[in-house]
């Protein structure tokens, strides 16, 4: 059946200034597997993991889809009392007694890893930071964020690489003994975090030495383990690009500090990509172009090394900006629908960039979790607040409902890939989508997004699905907007209570879940074609599923 626009709807849309967008999805045209690369998450504060709200959120993340979610945290080896604070955490895994003998204590590390595993998640183990007893400059050790320098004694190289190596061997061996060899071998082990900036107060060569000792220790304890790095900052920066490039050169052709042979084991490559939001004329303007330039620059550097082109790539932090625990007007996007709409655009753009480079993208890690003992909707970059899910968590619930193969999408409201990388989405909104097909279902994720958080008209969507294998389909329509899947709006409508009552809290929990825009309905798809029409507000996302 040929698609015919509904003239009455078009005229109505035009009269109200709506943008009319035709989206065509070809269920018979597969463009690759729809891998759940989005199901990676991480955060600074490991001790929030096993707090009640942390456990709750871990369970929700693990339930997002039918493949395991991967979770990364800083500070797994940091010295301290296990009390969390913003951008801080500790496990006291390594100390030394009065005679200088190492003392290992895995109690807190196990609380963290067990929380993941009991929920069905996979640890993405970031090996860091430097225990106080091993640091070359241990004092001062604990920072006092947001006051003063956060890069204190925990960011320095070890004073004894052999003892550092022994610590890593003990850590991996303990995990093998506690959680089993097969389970532990399924984890990724990443060496340090952002060594090109203040997180590493050593030279690039010293990081390469740390990597050699760490990767050797991991492999000695568990030869089949996956170890990688260097988790550098965005490669669109010349300094970060140079660091990533020299590290890859070291792994492929440099002299190994441990074995004295050429090269170092590298099972995956990780780097970070960040956006750059601004506060302009009283509103937030997102900087998605900066994030996409980081992604593109990193892929180009990896492509320079033929031996590495097929290695898995993990964007082990991929976010709209840098500091989850920081608060400012330019971060006002975090509570509302602008954040999930941004994530949707970023997901498709990253998929297209990696497809263009023929790269092996394994994961896109969202650096966001939850913050304990903070006001409701306090403005941190998080997935939930005081046990209440924020709208951004629902974009991942939508993605989790998509499975199978990715299928072709054409939209006359799309913005070309190069334009997003170079300029973002500034001149006008992008109305575009991703689609997948499983054995008995087609899922279409659609968004109406613009970098500027200002009011604008909705888009009138004319969605056409061709190549359906059934003549009758059940349609489900999920939505994130101001009044659906949005606990922030519900909280404001309550008067923004500082301490919601039990009844209000339960209502907010319900409001934070993914909602359907309307009840499911059956529709005839004619000659294997379905047409579906709806209005999509600016900074809103729809997931439309056709099942049979």
Image: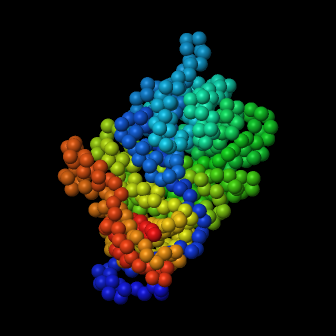
Q: Is residue 374 left or right of residue 369?
A: left
Query: Considering only vertical position in the picture, is 114 above or below 347?
Result: above
- Give the x, y percent position of residue 208: 68, 39
Name the residue: 77% across, 33% down.
259
Q: Is residue 497 left or right of residue 24?
A: left
- Give the x, y percent position of residue 264: 73, 41
Q: Quadrant of the C terminus?
A: bottom left
Name the residue: 77% across, 39% down.
255
Query: Considering only vertical position in the picture, is 88 above or below 166?
Result: below
Residue 318 appears in the figure: no
Q: Is residue 421 left or right of residue 85?
A: right
Q: Is residue 25 left or right of residue 358?
A: left
Name the residue: 59% across, 50% down.
314
- Give the x, y percent position of residue 528: 49, 79
Residue 168 found in image quarter? top right
Q: Residue furthest top?
A: 99
Q: How many marks?
A: 0
- Give the x, y percent position of residue 436: 52, 66
User: Viewer-proximal residue, 223 or 100?
Assistant: 223
Name the residue: 59% across, 45% down.
231
Residue 295 appears in the figure: yes
User: Viewer-proximal residue, 461 or 328?
Assistant: 461
Colour approach in the figure: rainbow
């Amino acid at each position: 059946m040929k698609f015919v626009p509904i003239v009455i709807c078009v005229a109505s849309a035009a009269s109200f200034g709506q943008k009319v967008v035709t989206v065509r999805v070809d269920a018979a045209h597969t463009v690759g597997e729809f891998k759940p690369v989005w199901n990676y998450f991480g955060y600074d504060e490991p001790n929030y993991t096993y707090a009640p709200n942390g456990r709750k959120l871990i369970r929700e993340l693990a339930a997002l889809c039918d493949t395991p979610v991967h979770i990364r945290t800083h500070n797994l080896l940091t010295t301290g009392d296990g009390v969390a604070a913003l951008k801080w955490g500790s496990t006291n895994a390594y100390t030394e007694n009065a005679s200088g003998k190492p003392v290992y204590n895995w109690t807190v590390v196990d609380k963290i890893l067990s929380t993941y595993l009991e929920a069905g998640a996979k640890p993405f183990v970031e090996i860091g930071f430097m225990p106080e007893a091993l640091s070359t400059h241990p004092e001062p050790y604990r920072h006092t964020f947001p006051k003063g320098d956060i890069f204190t004694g925990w960011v320095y190289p070890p004073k004894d690489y052999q003892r550092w190596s022994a610590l890593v061997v003990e850590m991996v061996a303990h995990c093998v003994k506690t959680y089993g060899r097969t389970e532990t071998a399924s984890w990724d082990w990443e060496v340090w975090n952002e060594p090109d900036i203040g997180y590493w107060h050593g030279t690039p060569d010293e990081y390469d030495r740390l990597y050699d000792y760490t990767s050797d220790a991991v492999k000695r304890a568990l030869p089949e383990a996956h170890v990688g790095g260097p988790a550098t900052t965005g490669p669109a920066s010349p300094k970060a690009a140079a660091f990533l490039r020299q590290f890859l050169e070291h792994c492929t052709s440099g002299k190994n500090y441990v074995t004295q042979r050429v090269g170092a084991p590298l099972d995956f490559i990780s780097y970070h990509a960040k956006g750059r939001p601004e506060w302009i004329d009283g509103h937030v303007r997102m900087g998605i172009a900066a994030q996409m330039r980081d992604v593109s620059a990193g892929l180009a550097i990896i492509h320079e090394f033929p031996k590495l082109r097929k290695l898995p790539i993990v964007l082990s932090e991929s976010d709209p900006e840098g500091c989850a625990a920081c608060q400012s007007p330019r971060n006002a996007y975090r509570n509302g629908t602008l954040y999930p709409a941004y994530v949707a655009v970023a997901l498709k753009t990253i998929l297209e960039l990696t497809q263009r480079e023929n790269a092996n993208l394994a994961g896109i890690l969202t650096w966001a979790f939850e913050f304990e003992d903070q006001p409701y909707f306090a403005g941190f970059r998080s997935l939930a607040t005081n046990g209440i899910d924020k709208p951004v968590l629902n974009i991942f619930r939508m993605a989790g409902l998509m499975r199978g193969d990715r299928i072709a999408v054409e939209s006359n409201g799309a913005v070309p890939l190069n334009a997003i990388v170079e300029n973002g989405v500034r001149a006008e909104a992008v109305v575009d989508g991703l689609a997948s097909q499983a054995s008995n279902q087609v899922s279409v994720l659609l968004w109406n997004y613009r970098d500027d958080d200002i009011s604008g008209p909705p888009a009138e969507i004319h969605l056409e699905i061709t190549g359906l294998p059934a003549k009758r389909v059940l349609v489900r329509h999920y939505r994130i907007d101001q009044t659906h899947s949005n606990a922030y709006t519900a909280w404001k409508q309550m008067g923004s209570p500082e301490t919601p009552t039990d009844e209000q809290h339960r209502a907010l929990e319900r409001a934070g879940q993914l909602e359907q825009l309307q009840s499911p309905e059956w529709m005839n798809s004619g000659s294997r074609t379905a047409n579906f029409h709806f209005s999509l507000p600016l900074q809103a996302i729809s997931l439309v599923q056709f099942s049979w």
